[in-house]
Image: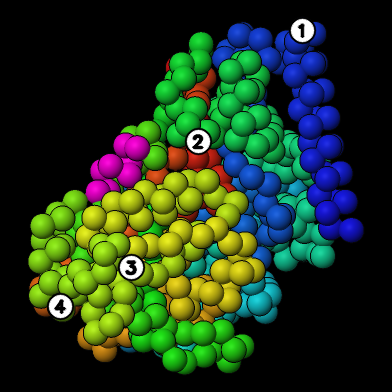
Amino acid sequence: MFKKMKILSIILSFAFITLLFFGCSQGDTRFNDTRDKGDELILAVGSEPDQGFDPTSGWGRYGSPLFQSTILKRNSNMEIVNDLATQYSISNDGIVWTVELRKDVKFSDGNPLTAADVVFTYETASKSGSVVDLSVLESVEAIDDYTVKFNLKKPQSTFINILVNTGIVPRHAYDNNYSQNPIGSGPFKFVQWDKGQQLIVEANPKYYGKEPFFKKITFLYLSEEAAFAAAKAGRVDVASIVPAYANQEILGMRLETIQSVDNRGIMFPFVKAGEKTEDGYPVGNDVTSDAAIRKAINIAIDRNGLVNGILNGYGSPAYTVCDNLPWWNAETVINDSDMDSARKLLKDYGWEETDSDGILKKEGMRAQFRLIYPSSDQTRQSLAIAVADQVKPLGIKIDVEGKSWDDIKMLMHSNAILFGWGSHDPLEMYNLYNSKYRGVGWYNTGYYYNSVVDDYLNKALLATSEDEANEYWKKAQWDGETGFSAKGDAPWAWLVNINHLYLVRENLNTGKQKIQPHGHGWPLTDNIEEWHWN
């Protein structure tokens, strides 16, 4: 049944795209060259949200929630500034967060947004069991109509990112259909959603912030190939594309390449083989548990070569999960593509070439392991093959295999996996490297453990200010002696950060963009109210 529905969806999408292009070719004035003087936009900038537009279920985590406002937000410099809040304070013990709200905010249906809506939003999200992690929240209460108090179970510095990412929903208009027909106080209001095809929004006349220049925006749900074709035909104002198309010049369009923390890296099983998870999946790998193997691969990889050869130059070398974000430690950058140092390291740790095929051995064990990537991802496949080729001269043999995500779930504790992460919330880093999360979901799948790193991560989480927390986040990466970066235990080999690429109509000004997170949502629209024609 699922396959039939999927095929039907593809057919409907193709029919819609065909109709769109045919209609345009028959003189639909919405798509002619004079549209850059109007107040409408047509965008193809990302995939359709499977769960709809409900922030209590996770909508908006990887970009602006568009329809809803948040208590705080990050500006283009990644600094936290007010949105719905006029000010906030944190008690000395980090337990109580008090937020003062604006008094001029209305939902798009004209009803005022008050503290009761904030309380309702957070109570709903905490009960939803969704990706919105509010396990630290003890209670939330309205002190008066425009004052909210959050009571935490314990200090948690990353709670501020919940206030940044969670859009506020209306208590009076929230029901089981809200995700399909959202009402909010953001710069745009929901008009129409044709699933599998398009979303239409209009400027919210009740919006308290800067009035958007554009009054109507249509989001088309197109594949990367179809989005490029639409841009080439002049049918869209912005199209998200892959690096393979980036060097093709399109009349009337310019290429915008936006820095991201959308990274790709290799997770190494950190412990020796022999254990099993509660579900019976094998844990550990005798080869990758050897620090010399992990460190040698890290310093042998030619990251610039990967960026230029696979991403067509549209990316940057990656050294951690959070490069260039406020909590990144720049000391984690290493001198890579250093084959001589990698060979010496392996030799010093007892790896010697004893087989005729050139593969190193240590105590009878061959330097050989599997690297698994999701078979649906061509970029990860190319990265995996390239890394295997780069380290082969060291005497390390990596067997590259593509698998489904269902298969990867069973294999990810005992095999190297090519993952992708990247968030504006350092809690992601905590989850990936803290021993508390060994074998929990998709986080610390390699069972990494370092008590010093754990201590830094826990202190960062319990810090009562973002500045204090950032110092501990940085030390967890590398404190001069240990850490989870390649200079320390090297449980990962981070490879590249992928620039997000957009073809943009040449007269369209999209403002100053911040570093974008992992490729979900529509992060390009974070500052949508600033967009205008030049």
For the N terminus, the image quarter is: bottom right
Is 6 displayed left or right of 319 in the figure? right
> Residue type at mark 2?
Val
Q: Amino acid at mark 1?
A: Gly
Which image quadrant is residue 301 in? bottom left
Q: How far is the residue under mark 3 from the one under mark 4?
A: 19 Å
Q: Secondary structure at mark 4?
A: loop
Q: Is residue 190 above or below residue 441?
A: above
Q: Residues within 10 Å of mark 3 (few under 14, many from 20)?
A: many
The amino acid pointed to by label 4 is: Tyr
Q: Provide the residue span drawn in magenta.
A: 302-309
Residue at the spot of label 1: 27
Mark 3 lies on residue: 492
**Mark 2 and mark 4 in contact (Cβ < 8 Å)?**
no
Mark 4 lies on residue: 349
Q: Depth check: give the residue in front, 436 or 155.
A: 436
Does the residue at mark 2 contact the one at mark 3 (Cβ under 8 Å)?
Answer: no
Q: Looking at the rendering, in which quadrant would you find the C terminus?
A: top left
* Identity, as a three-letter code, of the amino acid under mark 3: Trp
Disc number placed over residue 403 in the picture, else none: none
Give the answer, above or below, for where 330 lies relative to 253: below
Residue in the image at 47% along x and 85% along y: 283
Residue 312, image x, y percentages: 37, 33
